[in-house]
Image (cartoon, rainbow, N blue to C red):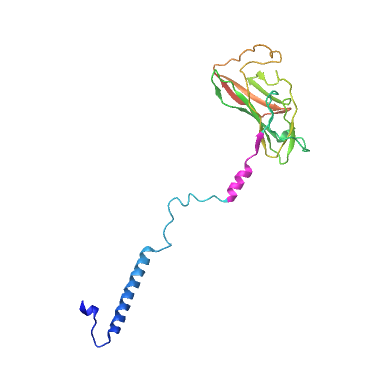
Amino acid sequence: MSTFMDPTGPQPPSVYWRRRAMVALGLVVVIIVIVLIVVRPGSGAAEPGAATTSTPPAIAEETTEASAPATGAAPAADATAPATDAPAAGDDATCAAGVVDLVPITDAATYASTQLPQISMSITNTGSVDCSLNLGSSQQALVVTSGQEQWWSSKDCQVNPTDQVVTIQAGQTLTTPAIAWDRTRSTPDTCEGTRTPVPAGGATYRLTVSVGDIVSADTAPMILN
């Protein structure tokens, strides 16, 4: 220990201290090099889940939003229903029948004996330009049939039908407020008093909708229990 702390030899002590300092510095450099080789900073793998949480490309979101049709509300077929926020028509041309897609809507496929079907329709402008259409209750009709027989129509006992010309933007879909079918058979002569209930017990009925001369291509089935 005394030799380490008090070096002896033919050279001055300062020479021996410098040599020892250089040896010690060399050992530190070797240790640092070994640590860098083992750790390899910057080459580690990404944390788990990093790839799955990345934000999708903006173009995908824009494409999705652009392809989704705008929706809104159209007047109800029932003239007594409250007013809706359907846009008033400007100077747009009348919608051609070929660009108007009507779809009948029911709130369920099967109904219990105590349930009343809620029926409505959607109106889509499938064209590439805005156009206007009379969507007032005077033009709308919801008709329930079974087989070749008509059982009920929203036109049979309609009160104070109205006209309402609205603008439908290109690609836009409007949906009418739902009205309840009371599961009875209607005719223009049965608007006063009690109407006859339609057969149920698993009977299937179909909803067809129309606006003026435009009729839905498909029907919506309803099973009444």
- State the count of labels: 0
Nearer to the camera, 3 or 188: 3
Chief secondary structure of the magenta portion: helix
- Establish if 190 lies above or below 60: above
Q: Position of residue 5 (x, y in %)?
A: 24, 78
Q: Residue 111, located in which quarter of the rendered image?
A: top right
- Could you tell me which residue is drawn at 21 percent across and 78 percent down? 2
Is 97 situated left or right of 183 in this image?
right
The C terminus: image quadrant: top right
Q: Is residue 95 visible?
A: no
Nearer to the camera, 145 or 131: 131
Q: Residue 167, located in which quarter of the rendered image?
A: top right
Is 148 situated left or right of 163 in this image?
left
Residue 46 forms part of the magenta stretch = no
Q: Position of residue 204 (x, y in %)?
A: 58, 20
Residue 71 forms part of the magenta stretch = yes
Q: Which residue is outermost to the right?
A: 91
Q: Is residue 207 visible?
A: yes
- Establish if 57 lies above or below 144: below
Q: Residue 189, located in which quarter of the rendered image?
A: top right
- Could you tell me which residue is drawn at 66 percent across and 22 percent down? 143
Is 105 situated left or right of 52 in this image?
right
Q: Which residues are magenta?
A: 58-72
- Establish if 182 lies above or below 18: above
Q: Which residue is outermost to the bottom?
A: 10
Nearer to the camera, 124 or 32: 32
The N terminus: image quadrant: bottom left
Q: Position of residue 94 (x, y in %)?
A: 77, 35
- Establish if 34 lies above or below 173: below
- Could you tell me which residue is drawn at 65 percent across and 25 percent down? 208
Q: Position of residue 114 (x, y in %)?
A: 55, 18
